[in-house]
Image (cartoon, rainbow, N blue to C red):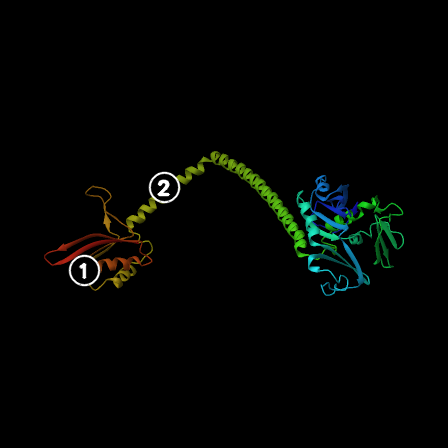
Amino acid sequence: MNSFLNWNSGLNNCSGAEIRLKQDGSCSVRLVSLSISKKQIHIEAKKEYSGMMPEALEKSDLEGPLAITVTGKGVLIKKTAGLEIITEQSLQHLFPHMKLSEFYIQHFPSGAFSYVAVIRKEIAERIITSFKGIGLDVVIFSLGPFVADQICPQINVYGEILGFDGHQLIFDENKNWKEYSFSADTKAEFPIKVDIEIMPEQFLLAYAVAFQLALHERLNLIEVEANEIKNNLSEFLARLKFKQIGMLMLVFFFVLLMGNFLLFSHYNSANQDLINATGAKSYVFENRQKLEEDVKMKETKLLKLGWNKGFRYAYICDQIGQTVPKEIKLNELQINTLSSTTTGILDEPEPKNGVIRIKGQTESIYAVNNWIYTLKDKSWVKEVKLEKYTADDQKQVQVFTMFLSY
């Protein structure tokens, strides 16, 4: 129906309602449901219910966020010279005997004039509570017919007067509101069309308030000045954004999982090809075995030659000598000690690479312990182990043997 370029409100559907309060306490509820797709707004349903508020709403089958405007009994409208800021003091001359803190106030500036509409908070909250009872949150709350200004460019207004459903609007040459009045006998002189679709006049305000909700990001909202009601729209949009982000994340992880599956399938197939190629070229494995045997043989030769892992003997001796406590006397320092791997008499002993045997004597076991801790702090030392600690009765000293690994 309506198309709006570069527009993305995040809404897929929304609803609008006009609540006309009657003198006998009953009401007439006019409902319009809109759907939004491909940057276009479509009217899905137009329904009207009458009766007491709770009973009338129980008959409805609305879905999605809801915007309403309240007209009729309990809504007071005053026209005044243009006001920039609405305060209790600026409205005192319009409502001299009213305690404005008990009312919700809506300000609609148009041209040189301002239209101020008020409703008691208890009436408004009763209406909002009734909608909550059927599972709908009111996210925009308006008063009077002023939301019709949002759709004036869409409807077929000929001349300076627009009458519909008891409301009569008089415009100036710039389409600003010059006069407003209400009379139950006021009807549209000709069928009202929104673009090319005929709109029954009793549903015009319900459509206007739904349209205002659909384009809330692009329009200056005509609504009551009450933060506790305005917050409903912010909270709803936050929940909607969270839901959309959650859906996007779900799609993202699904695509990621699918990509991982395809990638796994690709590499699994490639791996199978490699396995087959490996089986077809077994000679590569045979060459690898020969290389491994050659490496082992060279490593054995290095062990027999007493390879010192890159450390110089002078450096090792110097490092150890710097740490010897004065209470200890060294008797022997053997680097890469020799040992035989077999029991044969003629077997050539092999060096234990990376092992130093230290023998010494002392009168204090504490000196030996402290020396062990000092050696362990050296960055090149892996392990220090005390192998033997015995007393030499003849010399009246203790002798010890320990091994240092590097």
Can you name the residue that lies furthest to the left here? 394
Instruction: Tell which tag, 1 or 2, sits nearer the viewer.
Output: 1
Q: Amino acid at mark 1?
A: Ser
Figure check: 231 above or below 80: above
Density class for disc 2 (Cα within 10 Å; few <14, some 14-19, many ≥20) is few
Please provide percent x and percent y for residue 243. 62, 46
Circles 1 and 2, Cβ within 8 Å, touching? The answer is no
> Is residue 359 shown left or right of residue 150?
left
Figure check: 248 above or below 269: below
> Is residue 225 shown left or right of residue 309?
right
- Report the disc number at residue 364: 1
Count of marks, rendered view: 2
Q: Is residue 139 visible?
A: yes
Please provide percent x and percent y for residue 155. 84, 49
Between the residue at mark 1 and the residue at mark 2, the CA separation in whole angstroms equals 50 Å
Work out which quarter of the rendered image holds the N terminus and state it: top right
- Report the disc number at residue 293: 2
Q: Measuring 60% from the left and 42% from the top, which residue is drawn there?
A: 255
Residue nearest the observer in this picture, 391 or 54: 54
Figure check: 285 above or below 90: above
Please provide percent x and percent y for residue 344. 20, 41
